[in-house]
Image (cartoon, grey):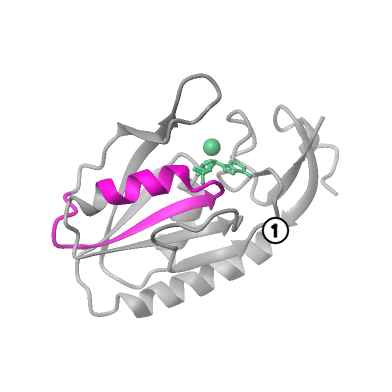
Amino acid sequence: MVDSTAQRLGRGRLGRIVYDEGRIRERVGEMAAEITLAYEDEEDLLVLGLLKGSFIFLADLVRGLQLPLHVDFLVAASYGSGTVTSGDVQLLYDAEASLKDRPVLIVEDIIDSGTTLKRLIPLLEEREPRSLELCALLHKRMTTLPKEPRWVGFDAPDEFLVGYGLDYSESFRHLPYIASLDQE
Ligand code: IMP
Ligand code: MG
């Protein structure tokens, strides 16, 4: 259970801690070691974070990568009319770096419906990266993607999760652990 101080850290009620700091640190370290091995012969890796949710995960992950690399970010928004997602994806901020002919690793916080990635990946493929791989901290396994992530931190429960970059109406991103959100 999250202590009463943490209940005042954002709007909404926190439930249980699903992944604590130690567990996240250990898993991110393992992923960084695997990614380092996979790209050991590459010299120009581009780590492309999807904002905002990936910012803490990406910051921890890249510090574990023993490789030359560049970091850039994208902000993608899925939007539709009303509450129905149209499946369109809009880039609110595009990376400055060119993807052409370089290995690109997309870093995502959580895969839920997969709507964003289903649209975003073909768009990035058009830029002709040498390779395009996906690394997600959490995967709810609600969907299959045309391109499944090569690295997944945890298979997440079907609950709304916050913390370690994940938000509920922009709250709770700064928590060092991942907690569930109690439904009111
Ligand atoms: P998807 O397009 O449904 O796969 O989800 C895209 C985005 O929705 C993720 O990158 C997150 O920013 C957000 N999201 C999905 N599930 C959760 C959750 O449980 N907590 C917080 N954000 C979520
Ligand atoms: Mg979000």
Q: Which amino acid does label 1 sit on?
A: Tyr
Quadrant of the rendered image holding ligand 1: top right
Residue 59: x percent and y percent? Answer: 45, 54
Q: Which residue is drawn at 49% across and 31% down?
A: 85
Viewer-closest of 149 and 16? 149
**Magenta residues?**
98-123
* Residue occupying the far top of the picture: 82
Q: Is residue 110 magenta?
A: yes
Viewer-closest of 125 and 181? 125
> So how many labels did they put on this image?
1
**Quadrant where the image shows the C terminus:** top right
Q: Residue at x 19, y 71 (%)?
A: 43
Label 1 Cα neighbours within 10 Å, binned few <14 / some 14-19 / many ≥20? some
Residue 24: x percent and y percent? Answer: 62, 62
- In the image, residue 163 above or below residue 147: above
- In the image, residue 170 above or below residue 128: above
For numbered disc 1, what is the local secondary structure?
strand
- In the image, residue 156 above or below residue 165: below
Q: Would you say 27 lies left or right of 12 here? A: left
Name which quarter of the figure residue 167 lies in.
top right
Viewer-closest of 106 and 64? 106
Q: Does the magenta stretch include residue 112?
A: yes
Q: Would you say 52 lies left or right of 66 here? A: right
Name which quarter of the figure residue 19 lies in.
bottom right
Q: Which residue is drawn at 14% across and 62% down?
A: 101
Ligand 1 within 8 Å of the CB at mark 1: no
Q: Which residue is drawn at 19% across and 65% down?
A: 130
- In the image, residue 11 above or below residue 166: above
Residue 33: x percent and y percent? Answer: 45, 76
Residue under label 1, please give it: 19
Residue 153: x percent and y percent? Answer: 56, 64
